Every structure is written in C-alpha cells, then in structure tokens.
Amino acid sequence: MNRRLFLEDLTRAAALCAVVPNVWRVTARPRLADDPFALGVASGDPTPTGAVLWTRLAPRPLEPDGGMEGPRTVVAWEVAEDEGFARVVRRGRATAAPELSYSVHADVDGLRPDRWYFYRFSVGGASGATSPVGRVRTTPADGATTPLRFAVASCQHYETGLFTALGHLAREELDLALHLGDYVYEYGPYPNRVRRHAGLEIRTVDDYRRRYAQYKSDPLLQAAHARCPWVVTWDDHEVDNNYAGGEGENEFESQEQMHQRRAAAYQAWWEHQPVRVPRARSWADLTVYRAVRWGGLARFAMLDGRQYRSRQACGGELQTVPCGDWNDPARTMLGAAQERWLDDGLARDGARWHVLGNQVMVAPFDQDPKAPERLDMDQWGGYPAARERLLRTLAGRAAGRAVVLTGDIHSSWVNEVRRGRAAVAAEFVGTSISSGGDGAEKWGAVTDEALAANPHIRWHNARRGYMTCEVTADAWRTDYRLVPYVSRPDAPVATAASFRLAHGRAVIERG
Ligand SMILES: [Fe+2]
C-alpha cells in the first residue's frame, strides 16, 4: 500500500481501457469511489455446461467489510452470448452476505459446451450499479479433443513489483488461466529489514480480506480475471511462509493460534476466488484439491501441497541429505487421502494429457555439484518417500503423457522428471508475476557447474512473467513469456524460450 497508490492504479486503469476494450467496461456506475464492483469480476472452474462467476461488493475496498454495511444484499447476474447482452441465455440472483464479506459465487449451469459467453453483475436495480463485463467459456464436451491454450501464473507479491505480466496475460488468446498460489503474501510493511517479523504479519480474517481487497484493486489483475476462466490453487503465502499442515513458520505461534490463522486465511481465500470448493464444517479444513477436465484432451489435477504435509525435515531450508527424518516413509506432501484421489483420477480418466497443478518443484536441484546431495527441504526433494509415491503413480498411470506445472520459486525451470533413469513426466516451473522484484537472467545458485551436475534440468531463467501452453492430442508446447523489469510500468513481454513434447514421450525438445 505504501508504494502503489490508488491514484497510480486509476491512471493505469484508464490506459488499460484503451488497450483491452473488451474487459474493462462499466456500463452504469455511480460515483467511482462508491462503485460496489471496485474489485472487478472473475470466473473459474469451468465445466462443459457452466462455470463459477465471482464478485465481491466492496465500494471502499480497504475499509472494514469493503465499505459495505447492513444485511444481505441481492446481486443479479446475467450470462449472454454477446458482449452487448442482447442475447442473454441465463440470469439469476445471488446473495452477498456480511459473514462472507459480501462476496458472490454464482455456479451457473445450463450453458452449451465449448462456447464463449459474457457475464456481468448488477445491484440496486435501475438506479444501481453494473459490474465490468467478464468473458467466460465452457469446456468441450466429454471426449472432445478441441485444442487448448492456457496461461500459468504464480507468486504476485504486490509490494515487490508491478503486475505488468498480468496485463500482458490479459491480452493473450487464452481458454483458461491457472494460478498455482502465492496469490497474496502475508508479510507486514515492505521494504522492511525484519520482513519475517511475525508481529507485523496478517492474522485475522479481516486482515486477510483487506489484503485480498488491496491486491484485487489492481486493474491488471482484474483484467486478467475478466479475460477468461481461472483455475486456482494455493501455496504457502495465502496463509504463512512455509507452513506445513497445522504448523506455522513462527515458533512462538501455538498450534491453536495457527489453526485459527489457517481458518481465517482459508475463509478469505474462498471468499475471493472463483472456485467451486464446498464449504467445510470448519474453514480450517477446506478441501481445495480438485480436477478440471478439458474434454478428453486434458485433465488438470489441482493439488494442495500445504494443508496436509509433514513438517520440513531437519529444520527446513537447504540441507545436505540424508539427515534426520528426511527419508521417513511416513512423511507426506499431499496426505494419504489426496494421494489416493490423485492415483484414482490418473487411473480412471483416459485424458490424452494428465496435468498436475502443483506448488513446489518435483525434480530435485542438487545445489552441491560435488557430492553429497544438498536440497531445499521445502520442495518435493525434501520428501523423498512421498516423491517416490508420486513418481510411481505418474509412471504407472500416465507415463509420457504427464505434465507437472509448478510455481513457488520465482524462477523458470524446465525439468525432465525421472524415476531412476526413466523420464516419466515433463515439469514446467513458472516464474513469479512480481515476487522478488526485477529478477535476473539466472538465480545465483544456478552456476554452469550446478547445471552440469543436474542434467535433467534443461533450462533456467530468473526473470518475471508467466507461461503459455498450447495443447493438442499429439503435441504440447510451452512458451516462457517474460518481462525485463517490474519496478517501473510498461515492460514489454517476449518469449524467452519454447519447449515441445510429443504425446507418449516424456522427452522435452527446445524450440
Ligand atoms: Fe512465492
């Protein structure tokens, strides 16, 4: 907040209006300061016949309850075949309730497969307000192998850089966007020499709500959401850096305090994301791992690698292995139920491609080129038994047609995922939207010597941006779309590298 003033955002909103006319339109609005749709609109979790449409009434986003007061408010929604809403095919009403921060989730059904639609919300009748228009599309019918083009984003630390990459993403021709987590960060004021000073971190449901409101006030993030449906999962910073299951990063935080914090963070996440995730008895136990299918072409298994995982081994961070309980087969990344769900889904679904929406890197990066192995304990390499179970599932159910998409580490990596000497999957690790600031061509630890010692790592870069993926029945292509800086506006985007996969082979080719 201290760096990116609201005025700056409004200026960029006006600029964006000229560039992306389709996605930033307010048809009837009251005074701008009181626009209840100041956080924009979003759609997500599409099916062949519908999608979830999202908004939140927040006329003054940074105030408690977004500046809303009073009881439940009725919000009308419309879905049309045309941008002018001459051919409305579905309409309905949803309730914005104070206990859910006046957020709206309309789970629309009855649409036709493989079609684009437009949607908007309105409140207050003829004298009220109408939201910006969003675009949403349904997925192809079961079995159809219609080609797919989608983007993958992660890690958007607001205070460390502008969301320029999301503005570029909003101008791509996309069917879908995936977000792999670190959608918000929980830290206190920045820059700050005691960044991890836990006393400054957000903790209550109102804290997390205000943080989402701050991020979602960004017009570039809003434009990216309005452009196409998103499929979202989370990583650690939606709650607390490197939290594991019920344990937080800060030692003074008791399990009870962490449980309450997790409930607050999960609730605010649910309120602000266009997800079809059923509410649980407790907000601390939200089940967010789920699958989205693109006809018979691709099945996206969106994973939750935080809620059920065992504590990082040997105190976490970078460790030389073996150490402590690192190799204990009881240690888990996904938890037993999610492991079973993943294995069942891969076994039962005959999709041409099985895609994992994953948090932390699966392929190991040995940071000590001279033996022994030195690994990041937060990644899959820190959970060797769980990783072996994952690789066994991929090898047994989807060898040569599994693609792992990963976020978390604010840099791009292209990895062959190997089990023994056999390549079983391709892993494309996307960089951050803004986390870590401008970035560099390479991350410090990735020396030529280190790359030579990790031959399964095919490419690396530490600039900011996102990936786009083009998928057909026979081929997969990933483009790394990177920006040279995020510390000032208007960075251009360019494809830094492209990679191809043929269906049935886990071999990655450049170009
Ligand atoms: Fe991150």
Image (tube, helix red, strand yellow):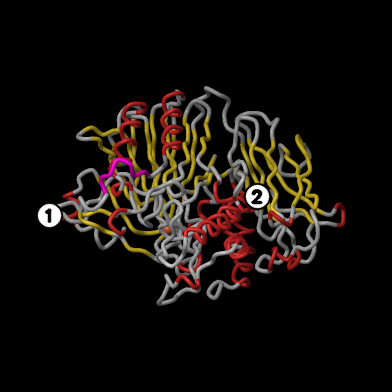
Residue 146 coordinates in the image, percent (x, y):
51, 28
- The residue sitting at the left extreme is 370
Mark linked to residue 370: 1
Q: Is residue 180 magenta?
A: no
Residue 169 coordinates in the image, percent (x, y):
51, 51
| 442 left or right of 71 in image | left
Most foreground residue, 139 or 509: 139
| 27 left or right of 24 in image | right
State the image quarter where residue 77 is shown: top right
Most foreground residue, 343 or 184: 343
State the image quarter where residue 470 is shown: top left
Q: Residues within 10 Å of mark 2 (few under 14, many from 20)?
A: some
Location of residue 192 with respect to 65 vertically, above or below = below
| 11 left or right of 460 in image | right
Most foreground residue, 185 or 122: 185
Q: Quadrant of the N terminus?
A: bottom right
Amino acid at circle 2: Asn
Residue at the image point whose x is 44% and y is 76% from the top: 192
Q: Quadrant of the C terminus?
A: top left
Residue 487 coordinates in the image, percent (x, y):
45, 69
Amino acid at circle 1: Lys
The residue identified by callout 2 is 22
Mark 2 CB in 8 Å range of ligand 1? no
Q: Is residue 331 magenta?
A: yes
Read off the magenta span.
326-332
Residue at the image point whose x is 36% and y is 53% from the top: 311
